[in-house]
Amino acid sequence: MTPAEQIKSIRASTGLSQAKFAETFGIQSRTLERWESGVRNPPPYVINLLRIAVENTMHPADLEEDHDQADHHSGNR
């Protein structure tokens, strides 16, 4: 699997858009776009860190709960 495919797969497992994934993990959106398109390759340690972070901290239900709370606090409900 190429680095681009690995990054796409990791992000896809979260169900997040590129923008939200980048924001969540402190990555510039343009950088993530370049990684996923294969224009640039992320350092191997970044792929490993993202995989570990997603596997150990990101759960779809938690993401929805966080999103719902943010909407509630911002008056978007």
Image (tube, rainbow, N blue to C red):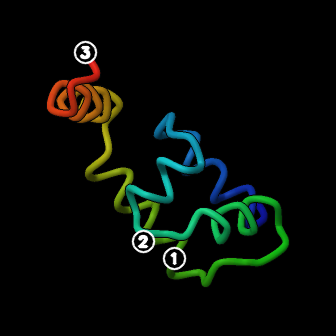
What is the spatial separation of the Cα atoms under label 1 and label 3, in whole angstroms? 36 Å
Mark 1 Cα-neighbour bin, 10 Å: few <14, some 14–19, many ≥20: few
> Which residue is located at x 83 percent, y 67 percent?
38
Q: Are marks 3 and 2 in contact (CB under 8 Å)?
A: no
What is the spatial separation of the Cα atoms under label 1 and label 2, in whole angstroms? 5 Å
Q: Label for residue 25?
A: none
Q: Position of residue 48 (x, y in %)?
A: 48, 71
Q: Between 70 and 13, which is closer to the camera in this rendering?
A: 70
User: Mark 3 or mark 2, which has the lower sequence index?
Assistant: 2
According to the picture, the residue beneath numbered tag 3 turns out to be 77
> Which residue is located at x 42 percent, y 71 percent?
49
Q: Left of 62 or right of it: where is 7?
A: right
User: Mark 1 or mark 3, which has the lower sequence index?
Assistant: 1
Image quadrant where one finds the C terminus: top left
As shown in the figure, which amino acid type bears the numbered disc 1? Answer: Val
According to the picture, the residue beneath numbered tag 2 turns out to be 49
> Which residue is located at x 38 percent, y 52 percent?
54
Image quadrant where one finds the N terminus: bottom right
Q: Quadrant of residue 71?
A: top left
> Which residue is located at x 36 percent, y 50 percent?
55
Q: Are marks 1 and 2 in contact (CB under 8 Å)?
A: yes
As shown in the figure, which amino acid type bears the numbered disc 2? Answer: Leu
